[in-house]
Amino acid sequence: MTKKVLGIMVLSFVGLYAGSLKVSIVSRASSYLNGDIRYSVFSLFDGDIKTCWAENVEGDGSGPERPMTWDNSGLFVIDRNGAGEYVNVGFNPKSSPFLIDTIRIYNGYGKSEEIWKKNNRVKGLSLLFLYLVVKNNETNVITTNREVLLSDSGWNEISLHELKVNPTNIDAVKFTILSTYPGTHYNDTCISEIEFWYKGKKYEIANLEEAKREYLRRYIEERRKGSKGLYNSELSTLSEENYEKLMKAVGWEVEKDREKRTFLVEFAENGEIILEWLNWAGEGSEAFRKHPRGVAGYWKIDENGSLWIKIGDNPWKKEMLNDYTILKGTDLEGLALSDWDECGESWEGEE
């Protein structure tokens, strides 16, 4: 399984309505599968068990949580720092008191019985309840932690009364995977739905689609900003196959001593991937005439925020997001990028 990518969802409309309960939430997942928004936190609240959230770390995503490092946008995880995958749900009701007495969870990927069996399900689950208490103009955080054992079936119902948890004015709930039931085929742990109830009525999540569109807009914007730029690169880390594809795409000779060559890789604004030979290994002007700038291929961001790369005449390939492997799953997988921060800053300055 590949690593990372984070999902954030902000829902802005809130209220308690006659005959129904509605609430806005802010939800964040520690990761979701391959950066594909179909497996993000949005799938937990869409009322459809045939969609799911799936974690995206090596292993089953269970175990003690360790801190993560985020980028400045809050959209990407720079360093996952361990397992213990989680979903955090924050509430923002305008009506008080805000009450929850039951949480229902559809455990596993409910798309079909076969797919449900193939993927992991949650066994041990930690629930961290957070309350913000204002006293004497000071806000204090009070937390209550409980651990539950989910059944290896679809719907599981968790009673806050049985857990001896205060149901009034909960500000957030954090769900952390502690252990799993193994799937027969995949090592991805999935949850299809999370629901919040009070006195037999389910809270509806207001403006779900609007929030999803806003998230996508921000996500794609950040991905585009992060993908384009000029990067110093060594091609020695590419596989022989990918190296030959790159050289063929720009019409250059395949040289055996490629580890001595340094290149400039540009993800240009117009969608081109440009390769330029650099004079960092002592080559003279003859080398530059032999290796001019060349268009190696193209890049694009799709409507789900995924990065696609096409090198030469080869087919488009989608990047499988990973903490340690650059451009995984594409014909540039393994590309070693140096001076990433410096190049990124200089590019942003040019915009």
Image (cartoon, rainbow, N blue to C red):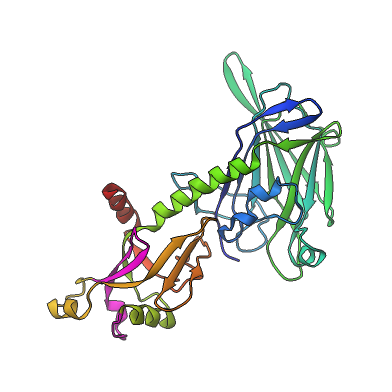
What residue occupies the far top of the structure in this picture?
136
Q: Is residue 184 above or below residue 71?
A: below
Residue at (61, 24) in percent of width and height:
140
Taking the image as shown, residue 334 lies to the left or right of residue 141, namely left
State the image coordinates of residue 259 (x, y, percent, origin top left): 31, 78
State the image coordinates of residue 116 (x, y, percent, origin top left): 78, 62
Q: Is residue 178 above or below residue 241?
A: above
Residue at (74, 37) in percent of width and height:
204
Q: Quadrant of residue 167?
A: top right
Q: Quadrant of the N terminus?
A: bottom right
Residue at (80, 67) in percent of width and height:
114
Taking the image as shown, residue 41 lies to the left or right of residue 316, namely right
State the image coordinates of residue 336 (x, y, percent, origin top left): 38, 68
Q: Is residue 268 a member of the stretch shown in magenta?
A: yes
State the image coordinates of residue 90 (x, y, percent, origin top left): 64, 36
Q: Quadrant of residue 11?
A: top right
Residues in magenta? 251-277
Q: Is residue 128 above or below residue 58?
A: above
Q: What is the total number of numbered labels drawn onto the structure image?
A: 0
Evaluate whether residue 75 shows in this view: no
Between residue 7 and residue 239, name the one nearer to us.
Answer: 7
Evaluate whether residue 53 shows in this view: yes
Q: Is residue 13 a member of the stretch shown in magenta?
A: no
What residue occupies the far left of the structure in this picture?
285
